[in-house]
Image (tube, rainbow, N blue to C red):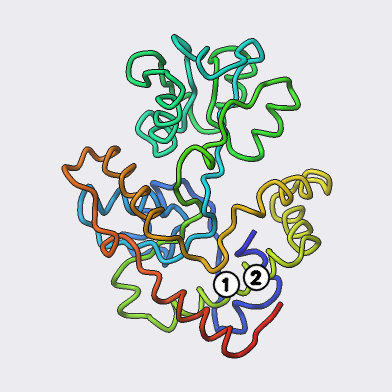
Amino acid sequence: MLYPMAQEQRYLEQEGIDLKIVLVAPAVSIQALTAKSVHFTLAGTSALIARSRSNVPFKVIFAANRQVLQWVLTRPEITSASQLKNKRIATPGVASSSSFMLKTALAKNGVNPDRDVVFLDPGAGNHLPALLAGTVDAAILGAEQRYAAVAAGMLEQFFLGREVKNTWGTLATSERIIQENPRQVAAVLKATLKALRLLRQSRDMATRTMQKFARVDAALSERVYDDLISTFTLDGTVDEETQRSDLAVIRDITQAAEPMAATQAYDFSIVRAANRQLNDAGWRP
Protein backbone atom coordinates (compact mmCIF):
# COMPACT_ATOMS: atom_id res chain seq x y z
CA MET A 1 0.00 0.00 0.00
CA LEU A 2 2.87 2.39 0.71
CA TYR A 3 3.88 3.13 -2.86
CA PRO A 4 0.37 3.63 -4.31
CA MET A 5 -0.35 5.89 -1.33
CA ALA A 6 2.84 7.86 -2.00
CA GLN A 7 1.70 8.28 -5.61
CA GLU A 8 -1.91 9.23 -4.86
CA GLN A 9 -0.92 11.75 -2.21
CA ARG A 10 1.67 13.22 -4.61
CA TYR A 11 4.44 12.64 -2.07
CA LEU A 12 6.69 11.24 -4.80
CA GLU A 13 5.86 14.04 -7.18
CA GLN A 14 6.68 16.59 -4.48
CA GLU A 15 10.11 14.98 -4.14
CA GLY A 16 10.69 15.08 -7.90
CA ILE A 17 10.13 11.35 -8.47
CA ASP A 18 8.07 9.81 -11.26
CA LEU A 19 7.70 6.29 -9.89
CA LYS A 20 6.54 3.39 -12.02
CA ILE A 21 5.48 0.26 -10.15
CA VAL A 22 6.17 -2.90 -12.14
CA LEU A 23 4.81 -6.28 -11.02
CA VAL A 24 7.38 -9.03 -11.63
CA ALA A 25 8.57 -12.15 -9.83
CA PRO A 26 11.29 -11.62 -7.18
CA ALA A 27 13.99 -13.39 -9.21
CA VAL A 28 13.16 -11.29 -12.26
CA SER A 29 13.39 -8.10 -10.22
CA ILE A 30 16.89 -9.09 -9.08
CA GLN A 31 17.92 -9.68 -12.69
CA ALA A 32 16.43 -6.33 -13.67
CA LEU A 33 18.26 -4.54 -10.86
CA THR A 34 21.51 -6.19 -11.91
CA ALA A 35 20.89 -5.12 -15.51
CA LYS A 36 20.06 -1.56 -14.39
CA SER A 37 16.53 -1.89 -15.80
CA VAL A 38 14.97 -0.94 -12.45
CA HIS A 39 16.20 1.22 -9.59
CA PHE A 40 14.66 -0.64 -6.65
CA THR A 41 13.16 -4.00 -5.77
CA LEU A 42 10.74 -4.95 -3.02
CA ALA A 43 12.32 -8.43 -2.99
CA GLY A 44 14.83 -7.38 -0.36
CA THR A 45 15.47 -10.89 0.91
CA SER A 46 16.12 -12.13 -2.62
CA ALA A 47 18.56 -9.25 -3.10
CA LEU A 48 20.51 -10.29 0.01
CA ILE A 49 20.48 -13.93 -1.10
CA ALA A 50 22.04 -12.78 -4.38
CA ARG A 51 24.65 -10.85 -2.44
CA SER A 52 25.45 -13.84 -0.25
CA ARG A 53 25.80 -16.18 -3.23
CA SER A 54 27.71 -14.00 -5.66
CA ASN A 55 28.61 -10.82 -3.77
CA VAL A 56 26.33 -8.68 -5.97
CA PRO A 57 26.48 -5.22 -4.33
CA PHE A 58 22.84 -4.94 -3.19
CA LYS A 59 21.64 -3.46 0.08
CA VAL A 60 18.32 -3.25 1.91
CA ILE A 61 17.51 0.40 2.59
CA PHE A 62 13.95 0.27 3.97
CA ALA A 63 11.84 -2.19 5.95
CA ALA A 64 8.06 -1.80 5.91
CA ASN A 65 7.23 -4.59 8.37
CA ARG A 66 8.94 -5.96 11.44
CA GLN A 67 7.11 -9.28 11.16
CA VAL A 68 6.85 -11.83 8.36
CA LEU A 69 3.40 -11.69 6.79
CA GLN A 70 2.97 -15.38 6.05
CA TRP A 71 0.87 -18.05 7.72
CA VAL A 72 0.76 -21.85 7.75
CA LEU A 73 -2.73 -23.28 7.35
CA THR A 74 -3.70 -26.93 7.45
CA ARG A 75 -6.53 -29.20 6.48
CA PRO A 76 -9.28 -29.14 9.16
CA GLU A 77 -8.46 -32.62 10.43
CA ILE A 78 -5.00 -31.42 11.52
CA THR A 79 -5.65 -29.67 14.82
CA SER A 80 -2.12 -29.28 16.18
CA ALA A 81 1.38 -28.65 14.88
CA SER A 82 2.53 -32.07 16.11
CA GLN A 83 0.08 -33.70 13.71
CA LEU A 84 2.11 -32.36 10.79
CA LYS A 85 4.46 -35.33 11.13
CA ASN A 86 4.54 -37.34 7.88
CA LYS A 87 2.49 -34.65 6.11
CA ARG A 88 3.02 -32.65 2.90
CA ILE A 89 3.48 -28.87 3.09
CA ALA A 90 3.21 -26.51 0.11
CA THR A 91 5.86 -23.78 0.17
CA PRO A 92 6.89 -20.88 -2.11
CA GLY A 93 10.03 -22.94 -2.78
CA VAL A 94 11.80 -25.65 -0.84
CA ALA A 95 14.77 -23.29 -0.46
CA SER A 96 12.70 -20.15 0.15
CA SER A 97 13.17 -18.00 3.24
CA SER A 98 9.68 -18.85 4.51
CA SER A 99 10.45 -22.58 4.28
CA PHE A 100 13.47 -22.11 6.51
CA MET A 101 11.39 -20.01 8.92
CA LEU A 102 8.77 -22.75 9.05
CA LYS A 103 11.48 -25.29 9.85
CA THR A 104 12.29 -23.23 12.95
CA ALA A 105 8.63 -23.19 13.98
CA LEU A 106 8.25 -26.94 13.42
CA ALA A 107 11.32 -27.73 15.49
CA LYS A 108 9.90 -25.67 18.37
CA ASN A 109 6.85 -27.94 18.26
CA GLY A 110 8.70 -31.24 18.29
CA VAL A 111 8.59 -31.88 14.53
CA ASN A 112 11.89 -32.63 12.81
CA PRO A 113 11.66 -30.49 9.64
CA ASP A 114 14.30 -32.52 7.80
CA ARG A 115 12.82 -35.93 8.53
CA ASP A 116 9.16 -35.68 9.56
CA VAL A 117 7.59 -33.59 6.76
CA VAL A 118 7.74 -33.28 2.99
CA PHE A 119 8.09 -29.80 1.47
CA LEU A 120 6.58 -29.29 -2.00
CA ASP A 121 6.45 -26.33 -4.37
CA PRO A 122 3.19 -26.48 -6.34
CA GLY A 123 4.05 -23.33 -8.30
CA ALA A 124 3.03 -19.70 -8.00
CA GLY A 125 -0.64 -19.24 -7.15
CA ASN A 126 -1.26 -22.95 -6.57
CA HIS A 127 -0.72 -23.17 -2.82
CA LEU A 128 -4.28 -22.48 -1.74
CA PRO A 129 -5.88 -24.66 -4.48
CA ALA A 130 -3.56 -27.52 -3.51
CA LEU A 131 -4.54 -27.18 0.15
CA LEU A 132 -8.27 -26.99 -0.58
CA ALA A 133 -8.06 -29.98 -2.91
CA GLY A 134 -6.19 -32.08 -0.36
CA THR A 135 -3.15 -32.44 -2.58
CA VAL A 136 -1.15 -31.13 0.36
CA ASP A 137 -1.90 -31.19 4.07
CA ALA A 138 -0.64 -27.68 4.85
CA ALA A 139 0.50 -24.59 2.99
CA ILE A 140 2.42 -21.39 3.58
CA LEU A 141 0.07 -18.59 2.53
CA GLY A 142 0.12 -14.82 2.23
CA ALA A 143 -2.52 -12.54 3.74
CA GLU A 144 -5.11 -12.69 0.96
CA GLN A 145 -4.96 -16.48 0.58
CA ARG A 146 -5.02 -16.86 4.36
CA TYR A 147 -8.47 -15.27 4.62
CA ALA A 148 -9.83 -17.41 1.81
CA ALA A 149 -8.44 -20.56 3.43
CA VAL A 150 -9.98 -19.76 6.84
CA ALA A 151 -13.33 -19.07 5.15
CA ALA A 152 -13.09 -22.51 3.52
CA GLY A 153 -12.62 -24.22 6.87
CA MET A 154 -8.85 -24.56 6.96
CA LEU A 155 -7.09 -24.17 10.33
CA GLU A 156 -4.32 -21.67 11.09
CA GLN A 157 -1.35 -23.36 12.77
CA PHE A 158 1.39 -20.73 12.58
CA PHE A 159 1.77 -17.03 12.02
CA LEU A 160 5.41 -16.92 10.97
CA GLY A 161 5.60 -13.32 12.16
CA ARG A 162 5.25 -14.61 15.72
CA GLU A 163 7.55 -17.58 15.27
CA VAL A 164 10.62 -15.76 13.96
CA LYS A 165 12.06 -12.28 14.30
CA ASN A 166 12.47 -11.30 10.65
CA THR A 167 11.54 -8.47 8.32
CA TRP A 168 8.99 -8.21 5.51
CA GLY A 169 8.41 -5.71 2.72
CA THR A 170 12.04 -4.72 2.41
CA LEU A 171 13.21 -2.33 -0.29
CA ALA A 172 16.63 -2.92 -1.83
CA THR A 173 18.81 -1.17 -4.35
CA SER A 174 22.41 -1.35 -5.55
CA GLU A 175 25.39 0.35 -3.99
CA ARG A 176 25.99 1.92 -7.41
CA ILE A 177 22.63 3.71 -7.32
CA ILE A 178 23.23 4.84 -3.73
CA GLN A 179 26.60 6.28 -4.72
CA GLU A 180 25.61 7.77 -8.09
CA ASN A 181 22.09 9.01 -7.23
CA PRO A 182 21.98 9.69 -3.48
CA ARG A 183 19.40 12.48 -3.89
CA GLN A 184 17.09 10.19 -5.85
CA VAL A 185 17.33 7.45 -3.22
CA ALA A 186 16.73 9.97 -0.42
CA ALA A 187 13.71 11.42 -2.25
CA VAL A 188 12.09 8.02 -2.73
CA LEU A 189 12.63 7.12 0.91
CA LYS A 190 11.32 10.46 2.14
CA ALA A 191 8.11 10.03 0.13
CA THR A 192 7.79 6.44 1.33
CA LEU A 193 8.17 7.55 4.95
CA LYS A 194 5.38 10.08 4.46
CA ALA A 195 3.17 7.28 3.15
CA LEU A 196 4.15 5.06 6.10
CA ARG A 197 3.14 7.78 8.55
CA LEU A 198 -0.15 8.31 6.71
CA LEU A 199 -0.86 4.58 6.63
CA ARG A 200 -0.32 4.27 10.37
CA GLN A 201 -2.47 7.32 11.12
CA SER A 202 -5.37 6.98 8.67
CA ARG A 203 -7.23 3.69 8.55
CA ASP A 204 -9.72 5.16 6.10
CA MET A 205 -7.07 6.35 3.64
CA ALA A 206 -5.16 3.08 3.85
CA THR A 207 -8.19 0.86 3.32
CA ARG A 208 -9.46 2.92 0.40
CA THR A 209 -6.03 2.65 -1.24
CA MET A 210 -6.06 -1.10 -0.64
CA GLN A 211 -9.50 -1.46 -2.21
CA LYS A 212 -8.33 0.38 -5.31
CA PHE A 213 -4.86 -1.09 -5.69
CA ALA A 214 -5.48 -4.68 -4.55
CA ARG A 215 -9.08 -4.77 -5.80
CA VAL A 216 -10.59 -6.06 -2.56
CA ASP A 217 -13.87 -5.07 -0.98
CA ALA A 218 -14.23 -2.70 1.96
CA ALA A 219 -14.83 -5.41 4.56
CA LEU A 220 -11.69 -7.33 3.62
CA SER A 221 -9.53 -4.19 3.41
CA GLU A 222 -10.62 -3.18 6.92
CA ARG A 223 -9.94 -6.67 8.25
CA VAL A 224 -6.47 -6.72 6.69
CA TYR A 225 -5.65 -3.29 8.07
CA ASP A 226 -6.76 -4.14 11.60
CA ASP A 227 -4.89 -7.45 11.55
CA LEU A 228 -1.63 -6.14 10.13
CA ILE A 229 -1.17 -2.50 11.12
CA SER A 230 0.81 -3.49 14.22
CA THR A 231 3.40 -5.24 12.03
CA PHE A 232 4.51 -2.02 10.30
CA THR A 233 7.71 -0.36 11.41
CA LEU A 234 7.65 3.12 12.90
CA ASP A 235 10.44 4.55 10.76
CA GLY A 236 11.35 2.11 7.99
CA THR A 237 14.11 0.42 10.00
CA VAL A 238 14.54 -2.70 12.13
CA ASP A 239 16.89 -3.37 15.00
CA GLU A 240 20.18 -5.25 14.83
CA GLU A 241 18.68 -8.43 16.32
CA THR A 242 16.16 -8.61 13.48
CA GLN A 243 18.89 -7.96 10.93
CA ARG A 244 20.97 -10.81 12.37
CA SER A 245 17.94 -13.10 12.28
CA ASP A 246 17.35 -12.26 8.61
CA LEU A 247 20.98 -12.94 7.78
CA ALA A 248 20.95 -16.25 9.67
CA VAL A 249 18.10 -17.45 7.44
CA ILE A 250 19.97 -16.28 4.35
CA ARG A 251 23.08 -18.14 5.51
CA ASP A 252 21.00 -21.32 5.81
CA ILE A 253 19.54 -20.83 2.34
CA THR A 254 22.90 -20.22 0.67
CA GLN A 255 24.79 -22.67 2.90
CA ALA A 256 27.40 -20.04 3.58
CA ALA A 257 30.02 -20.74 6.22
CA GLU A 258 29.18 -17.51 8.05
CA PRO A 259 26.34 -14.98 7.80
CA MET A 260 27.01 -11.67 6.10
CA ALA A 261 27.86 -8.73 8.28
CA ALA A 262 24.88 -6.44 8.81
CA THR A 263 26.90 -3.54 7.39
CA GLN A 264 27.18 -5.43 4.11
CA ALA A 265 23.48 -6.14 3.89
CA TYR A 266 21.73 -3.06 5.31
CA ASP A 267 22.06 0.69 4.98
CA PHE A 268 19.39 2.49 6.96
CA SER A 269 21.39 5.71 7.18
CA ILE A 270 19.47 7.37 4.34
CA VAL A 271 16.03 6.61 5.73
CA ARG A 272 17.13 7.73 9.19
CA ALA A 273 18.30 11.04 7.72
CA ALA A 274 14.95 11.42 5.93
CA ASN A 275 13.15 10.79 9.22
CA ARG A 276 15.17 13.51 10.91
CA GLN A 277 14.32 15.94 8.12
CA LEU A 278 10.61 15.24 8.46
CA ASN A 279 10.77 15.53 12.25
CA ASP A 280 12.76 18.77 12.12
CA ALA A 281 10.19 20.22 9.70
CA GLY A 282 7.34 19.07 11.95
CA TRP A 283 5.80 17.16 9.06
CA ARG A 284 2.48 15.40 9.72
CA PRO A 285 0.09 13.66 7.30
Quarter of the rendering occupied by the N terminus: bottom right
Q: For residue 197, which numbered disc appears in the image? A: 2
User: Can you tell which quarter of the image residue 75 is in?
Assistant: top right
Q: Residues within 10 Å of mark 2 (few under 14, many from 20)?
A: some
Q: For residue 1, which numbered disc appears in the image? A: none
User: Can you tell which quarter of the image residue 267 is in?
Assistant: bottom left
Taking depth in this image into account, of 169 and 43 the one nearest to the observer is 169
Quarter of the rendering occupied by the C terminus: bottom right
Residue underneath mark 1: 193
Q: Please, is residue 125 above or below residue 154 in the view?
A: below
Give x and y (percent) for residue 32.
37, 57
Q: Is residue 218 left or right of residue 169?
A: right
- Residue type highlighted by circle 2: Arg
Most extreme residue toward the bottom is 281
Give x and y (percent) for residue 252.
28, 38
Instruction: Check disc 1 and report its element: helix, strand or loop.
Output: helix
- Residue type highlighted by circle 1: Leu
Q: Please, is residue 27 above or below residue 77 in the view?
A: below
Taking depth in this image into account, of 185 and 109 the one nearest to the observer is 109
Distance from the alpha carbon under mark 2 to that under mark 1: 6 Å
Q: Are marks 2 and 1 in contact (CB under 8 Å)?
A: yes
Give x and y (percent) for residue 69.
56, 44
Q: Residues within 10 Å of mark 1 (few under 14, many from 20)?
A: many
Taking depth in this image into account, of 256 and 37 the one nearest to the observer is 256
Q: Please, is residue 71 above or below residue 44 in the view?
A: above
